[in-house]
Image: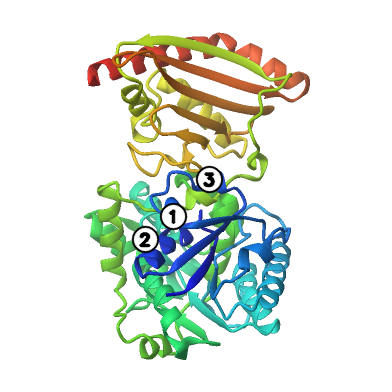
Amino acid sequence: MKKILVTGPTGYIGGRLVPRLLAAGHTVRVLARHPADLAGRPWTGNVEIAQGDIFCGDTLDAALEGVDAAYYLVHSMSDTPDFEACEETSARNFAAAAKKAGVRRVIYLGGLGAAAALSHHLRSRHRVGAIMREHGLNVTEFRAAIIVGSGSVSFEMIRYLVERLPLIPCFLYLRGTRCQPVAIRDVLSYLVLALDTPASEGRVIEIGGSAVHTYREMMEIYAQSRGLRRGFVSCPLWSPGLAARLVDLITPVPAVLARPLLESLRNDVVCSSDEALRLFPDIKPLDYRTAVQYALMRVSENAVETSWTTAYEPHYAKPCSFIDTEGIILQDHMQPIAAPAEKVYSVFAGIGGARGWFCAQWLWELKALQDRLIGGVGMRRGRRHPDTIQQGEALDFWRVERAVEGRMLLLRAEMKLPGKGWLLFEARPRDGKSSLLRVAAYFEPKGFFGNLYWYSLYPVHTVIFRGLTAEIKRRAETAA
């Protein structure tokens, strides 16, 4: 039994690793820049939460105090132009603090690939591991290629491209570059078992699935798993920017996230040894086809544990606390409902995603299209689960800033706006059988155009919110 620090607990890997460490009997502390974003996770009450920022170096000493081992699962990729410099700064801050605190083990998940001519993305991943070792830390660095699992960004890119394109453009690197994809369940097994595998200490360990494929073969296997007939057309040209724009238009993954991954397609990402199999004989890596089938099963069962959308936030909509101050415009709508507050909450907590926005859906879709055309997120991200919502999750072009079970949902706008916007849903109990629904839009305009934007759309918002409250009332009363 050890005391473990997990960085990046709101991320795709970290959010799945924490409950598995708890199940193994360890004491877990998580480091989060915004602890409120962890509210609603089923494991939150069983961990210690430390607030801190690795990039700024804030409170790292306190977070690492008394820790036996630490998982470094933080990445600065996406729409940060100098993400390599950001990753290096974060790694140096963390390594220095871990050395000072006397942390015995650091386990890091990086990227697979031979050292020569790496993409910026993979080069940065390798550099982070090297920085940890330069500081004299006992580092176990796992290197993985594409991680296959429901909600992973790589899997979602392949899934949506194959689902939506009957004829898939086959660029040069899709045909020739080799990849050894690994199932998310195997990655998590390696990460957990490393704690009790002394032979893995101080090593760089390459992990992968049981087979090697080209990227075209991976898309073909996905199509076969779904019973889809897909054709491929050769495309001799290759531009990561153009390919990223195609991914942006067709999949939920934005171009700024897709481009670093697509630039890595020129690198073979294949294990050069079987060291992982020898060090961890109990792990029998899945083949790609089986990993895809598991991921699809999770999607169909609405059992996606974590998603890339939780960790990704566009640069123009970084987290900010909601403060009701002078200068914020409010549009408020109230609706009495003959149903208890819990029933009303369950209705508006299920809004968005496949269910849509209950009223004037075509207007929401039009707004999403306009947002995507100017480089915003649009509605591409959907929601992780149709019924349950957690604080910090993405919901179409919103972020769940606050979620109070049975009472309130506060969404922060992540579409591109001339200002900052929030949408509040609140169910106020009146007696045991009725409640008052409040739907409020808050907008903090930026300059003249911000005010012009809001007031020009005021009539449209009025129609939408009246219809929205009426539909929530109808659904809640029907459910009650």
Residue at horizontal 63%, vertical 59%? 76
**Rounded to the nearest whole Å, what is the CA distance between mark 1 and mark 3?**
25 Å
- Residue 149 got which mark? 2
Q: Residues within 10 Å of mark 1 (few under 14, many from 20)?
A: some
Q: Find numbered disc 1 in the image and state the secondary structure of the residue it sits on.
A: helix
Q: Which mark is residue 37?
A: 3
Q: Secondary structure at mark 3?
A: helix
Kind of residue at badge 3: Asp
**In the current view of this chain or complex, which residue is farthest to the left?**
227
* Mark pair 2, 3: CA separation: 22 Å
Q: Residues within 10 Å of mark 2 (few under 14, many from 20)?
A: many
Residue nearest the observer in this picture, 305 or 287: 305
Look at label 1 and name its amino acid. Answer: Met
Identify the residue under disc 1.
Answer: 157
**Secondary structure found at label 2:** loop
Vertical side of 193 occupied by 234: above or below = above
Q: Nearer the viewer, mark 2 or mark 3?
A: 3
